[in-house]
């Protein structure tokens, strides 16, 4: 219903967060995606997570590449600056933006064609560098805007809407993210908001490169029998390793867990991740164990979800580059220009 | 070959004006010895212009270093060689061929060569370099390295280079490295003494102290451009290694480590990312520019090709970006170590859709410094990608150039950025509105204001308020405004430099970039032949009005450039809607720097043909 303007009047009893914002203040334009699209659920989860986390909308920058998923950045956080950039190249644009001003929260939204096909290189190198951001990959295994071609995350053997089986091996983005050095790696399902919202909150609070692969069925081209990215398939094969509760640094933990039922992972900023165990013995701070678990369970056809790995004390690109605290875009001549006296010395050394 | 034979040969005799070429093997350590040789003239007040002619290789392939010693200060490549220092048997024949009749061949005669390997019209000077070096040093690497210093010593002895000057240079090079200082001085002295004793009077090329260097500095264009980026306030540099631009990013790193570390915190006021490819380099630059930091990348032609999608986005989305293109011969597997000016069209119209971009054309390292800093200002002011079009000849050779200056009162032009306070005061904001009628809209930076000024950046599907729109009129409004902005750019870019000939003339010549020193020299030669030409040195695209006026004021204008397709001429014809017959191309594009001899010859020949009165019909004999 894109031709309808969104009503500006809000229900008077909408709950406001501590900043005085209601959920509406975190919404964007009306979505132009298909009714039932998994991506819209993810946008709703982002809105919910930002509202709950009390993010100041203008202190968040949202960037994306090209594709259905990348369009969604216009459909949430209308009071944030957004950048719909080049196909597969959101990671580099976001890296530059992050270098220019380290004080903002960076949210990158991408799709499987964008990240695993055309942009696989930038995806991998962003993780290597440890850019402080939340990377949400809305993964449906298919190209929507160009009408139904397989993407690189489509599983070998899964069928297209026309019944043709994919013969290429799938790129597993979470395995790749683990291998490339992402410090927060999760997988979720657009149909499971209870799992997704806390994951997004924890990712936004993570002070390193946080990656969430969200299986997000494409109702138009990849929701049929034979697809491994359909609502039915994912619901049947979803194997969560844990359920996450996220406690921001400022909040007291109010839920008690029976001894041994949960792991607590304090984060760098003082926030706490509480993981209710679903799989016995799964420790999300063990990177190699996470990779093993993923390989073993994916081989059985399971879709492994949950917080797969987190480094509680991550390093980011700014630390690697030893940059100053102040945002670069606030530095002027005084801080940046060495001046004429120094130039005189340089001239002297070149004679 | 004996000295008796040599005496019967004509000898070039020259003081402070000749060309020496060193033929070496890549990786043999000759570079620092050769640089020592070149710098010694500068310390004697004699201008010099050296050029590396090197292969795409780390070790083993031939490499040359050509030094023009020129009291008059002509810094272009002269062409021809008066003395060949032939240290590479692989290239012996071609090196021998290049020597001017009456010129000199200096070689290592430790092993005798048959007379058939020499030329009758060239004076041969042999010296047992390997023998001397082997007798003095044990280690194989030392033998090789000091052999280079020994020949520098011998050349100094024959040319009357003041030994004190060389000692001073060696002293500076090995300051605090006593272990290296002494053996280098000894090797130099060994060569010098040998020449004094055994080669006296054999070389007709000598030098004497002059006073023509003044306060000029000796610097590579890449280093100067990097320093321009430091002074111009660039904080983000993203790059991918590519010859001949790599040393620019590396120089930026070096200068920043010295000049941009916060004293208190010991933390960096710069970020350099060696990206995975040129797509990521430009992506990082665009992201940083969008977010208000000054960012640049340095690359060469193949890198530009990879960047073009992003360049188009930055053009339409109106994001500042500075791209320094150190041009070389194309394509990717082309002539990476040879110079050209052949990326003009690729940069002027880079990307898909209707795009055009400002370009600056520095003529030497001094202008590399200013243009790099100016590009950062222009990119912010115009909110668009700006190219600095240098080339290998300027970028990778040390060049004598005016000292760099900076006005401490100068302020960075950050362009039209609407601030928090302006938004708070209720100033209206529409991202792509032409408020000031100059085609340049206002932008806001992410994070500036809690309620106002946020906008969504995308390519062209937008209206003047940055809302999604595929409507034709919205598209047309935006791209017409971009054209107006390009008109505005004409008044902001560095203006062309006019030089009028001594006499009124119907001929004009347009040139730009590294052609400059050879052009200046050619003009003097042409004038000596009675050929007068007014010149206009272009410093930027789009072309300021003065360019059209210059062409209109002349019957014919030569366009001198270093590419096959006369790319600047094409731009002039196209952008100024000119009659192509008004512009005559003078083209040099074999990968070597253009010479004054070439320009003089080409223009003189064309003028001769043009001045011939055609025979009238029916009167033919």
Image (tube, coloured by chain):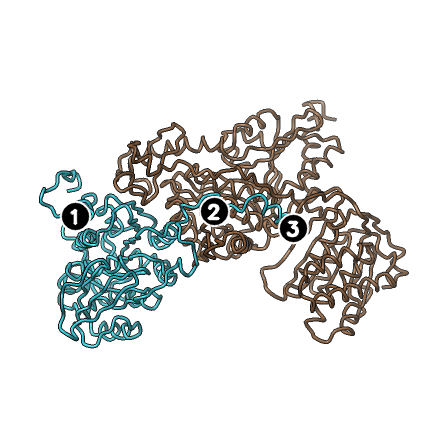
SS of the residue under disc 3: loop
> B481 left or right of B557?
left
Residue A222 position in % (x across, y down): 19, 58
Is residue B564 among the parts visible in the rendering?
no
Number of the label disc, if any, that sits on residue A23: 1
Q: Are marks 2 and 3 in contact (CB under 8 Å)?
A: no
Residue under mark 1: which chain is it in? A
* Residue A350 disc label: 3
Label 2 resides on the chain identified as: A
Camera-near label (2 vs 1) is 2
Looking at the image, is mark 1 or mark 3 earlier in the sequence?
A: 1
Percent of width and height locating residue B308: 42, 47
Q: Position of residue B271 (x, y in %)?
A: 45, 54
Q: Are marks 2 and 3 on the same chain?
A: yes
- Callout 1 secondary element: helix
Check the residue under mark 3 and report the chain it is in: A
């Amino acid at each position: 219903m894109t031709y309808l303007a969104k009503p500006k009047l809000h229900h008077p009893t909408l709950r406001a967060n501590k900043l005085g914002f209601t959920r509406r203040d975190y919404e964007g334009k009306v979505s132009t995606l298909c009714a039932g699209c998994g991506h819209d659920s993810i946008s709703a989860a982002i809105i919910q997570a930002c509202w709950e986390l009390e993010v100041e909308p203008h202190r968040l920058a949202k960037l994306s590449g090209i594709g259905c998923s990348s369009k969604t950045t216009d459909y949430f956080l209308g009071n944030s600056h957004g950048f719909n950039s080049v196909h597969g190249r959101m990671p580099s644009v976001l890296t530059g933006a992050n270098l220019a001003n380290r004080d903002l929260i960076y949210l990158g939204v991408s799709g499987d064609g964008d990240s695993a096909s055309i942009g696989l290189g930038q995806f991998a190198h962003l993780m290597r560098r440890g850019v402080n951001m939340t990377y949400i990959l809305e993964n449906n295994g298919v190209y929507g805007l160009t009408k139904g071609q397989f993407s690189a995350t489509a599983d070998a053997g899964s069928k297209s809407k026309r019944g043709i089986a994919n013969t290429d091996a799938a790129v597993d983005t979470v395995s790749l993210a683990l291998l490339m050095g992402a410090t927060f790696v999760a997988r979720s399902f657009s149909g499971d908001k209870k799992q997704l919202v806390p994951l997004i909150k924890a990712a936004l609070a993570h002070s390193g490169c946080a990656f969430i692969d969200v299986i997000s069925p494409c109702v138009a081209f990849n929701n049929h029998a034979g697809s491994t990215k359909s609502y039915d398939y994912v619901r049947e094969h979803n194997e969560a390793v844990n359920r996450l509760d996220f406690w921001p640094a400022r909040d007291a933990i109010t839920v008690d867990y029976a001894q041994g039922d949960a792991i607590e992972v304090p984060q760098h900023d003082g926030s706490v991740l509480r993981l209710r165990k679903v799989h016995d013995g799964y420790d999300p701070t063990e990177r190699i164990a996470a990779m093993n678990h993923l390989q073993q369970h994916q081989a059985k056809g399971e879709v492994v979800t949950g917080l797969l790995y987190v480094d509680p004390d991550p390093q980011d690109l700014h630390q690697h580059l030893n940059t100053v605290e102040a945002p670069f875009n606030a530095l002027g001549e005084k801080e940046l220009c060495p001046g004429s006296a120094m130039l005189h010395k340089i001239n002297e050394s070149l004679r | 070959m004996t000295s008796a034979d040599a005496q019967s040969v004509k000898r070039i005799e020259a003081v402070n004006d000749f060309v020496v070429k060193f033929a070496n093997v890549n990786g043999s350590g000759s570079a620092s010895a050769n640089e020592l040789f070149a710098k010694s003239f500068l310390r004697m007040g004699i201008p010099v212009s050296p050029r590396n002619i090197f292969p795409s290789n780390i070790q083993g392939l031939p490499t040359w270093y050509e030094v023009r010693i020129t009291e008059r200060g002509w810094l272009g490549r002269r062409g021809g060689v008066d003395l060949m220092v032939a240290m590479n048997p692989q290239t012996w024949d071609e090196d021998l061929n290049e020597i001017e009749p009456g010129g000199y061949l200096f070689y290592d005669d430790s092993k005798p060569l048959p007379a058939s390997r020499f030329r009758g019209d060239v004076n041969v000077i042999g010296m047992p370099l390997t023998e001397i070096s082997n007798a003095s040093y044990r280690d194989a690497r030392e033998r090789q390295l000091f052999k280079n210093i020994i020949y520098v010593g011998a050349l100094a002895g024959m040319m009357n280079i003041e030994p004190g000057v060389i000692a001073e240079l060696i002293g500076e090079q090995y300051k605090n490295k006593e272990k290296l200082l002494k053996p280098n001085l000894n090797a130099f002295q060994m060569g010098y003494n040998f020449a004094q004793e055994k080669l006296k009077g054999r070389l007709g090329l000598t030098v004497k102290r002059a006073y023509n260097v003044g306060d000029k500095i000796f610097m590579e264009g890449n280093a100067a451009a990097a320093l321009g980026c430091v002074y111009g306030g660039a904080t983000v540099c993203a790059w991918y290694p590519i010859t001949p631009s790599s040393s620019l990013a590396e120089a930026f790193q070096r200068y920043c480590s010295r000049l941009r570390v916060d004293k208190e915190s010991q933390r960096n006021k710069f970020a350099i990312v060696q990206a995975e490819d040129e797509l990521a380099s430009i992506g990082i630059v665009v992201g940083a520019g969008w977010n208000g930091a000054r960012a640049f990348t340095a690359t060469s032609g193949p890198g530009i090709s990879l960047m073009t999608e992003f360049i188009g986005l930055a053009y339409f989305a109106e994001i500042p970006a500075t791209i320094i293109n150190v041009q070389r011969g194309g394509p990717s597997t082309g002539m990476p170590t040879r110079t050209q000016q052949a990326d003009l069209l690729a940069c002027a119209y880079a990307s898909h859709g209707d795009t055009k971009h400002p370009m600056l054309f520095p003529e030497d390292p001094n202008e590399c410094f200013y243009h790099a800093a100016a590009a950062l200002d222009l990119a912010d002011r115009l909110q668009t990608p700006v190219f600095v079009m240098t080339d290998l000849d300027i970028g990778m050779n040390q060049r004598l150039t005016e000292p760099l200056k900076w006005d401490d009162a100068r302020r960075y032009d950050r362009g039209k950025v609407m601030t928090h306070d302006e938004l708070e005061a209720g100033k209206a904001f529409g991202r792509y509105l032409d408020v000031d009628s100059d085609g340049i809209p206002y932008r806001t930076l992410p994070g500036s204001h809690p309620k106002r000024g946020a906008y969504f950046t995308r390519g062209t599907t937008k209206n003047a308020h940055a809302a999604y729109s595929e409507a034709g009129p919205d598209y047309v409004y935006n791209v017409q405004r971009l054209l107006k902005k390009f008109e505005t750019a004409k008044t902001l870019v560095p203006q062309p430099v006019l030089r009028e000939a001594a006499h009124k003339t119907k001929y004009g010549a347009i040139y730009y970039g590294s052609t400059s020193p050879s052009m200046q020299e050619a003009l003097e030669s042409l004038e000596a032949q009675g050929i007068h030409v007014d010149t206009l040195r272009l410093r930027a695209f789009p072309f300021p009005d003065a360019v059209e006026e210059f062409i209109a004021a002349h019957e014919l204008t030569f366009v001198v450039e270093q590419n096959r397709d006369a790319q600047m001429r094409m731009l002039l014809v196209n952008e100024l809607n000119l009659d192509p017959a008004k512009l005559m191309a003078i083209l040099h594009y074999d990968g070597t720097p253009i010479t004054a001899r070439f320009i003089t010859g080409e223009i003189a020949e064309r003028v001769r043909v043009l001045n011939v009165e055609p025979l009238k019909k029916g009167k033919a004999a």
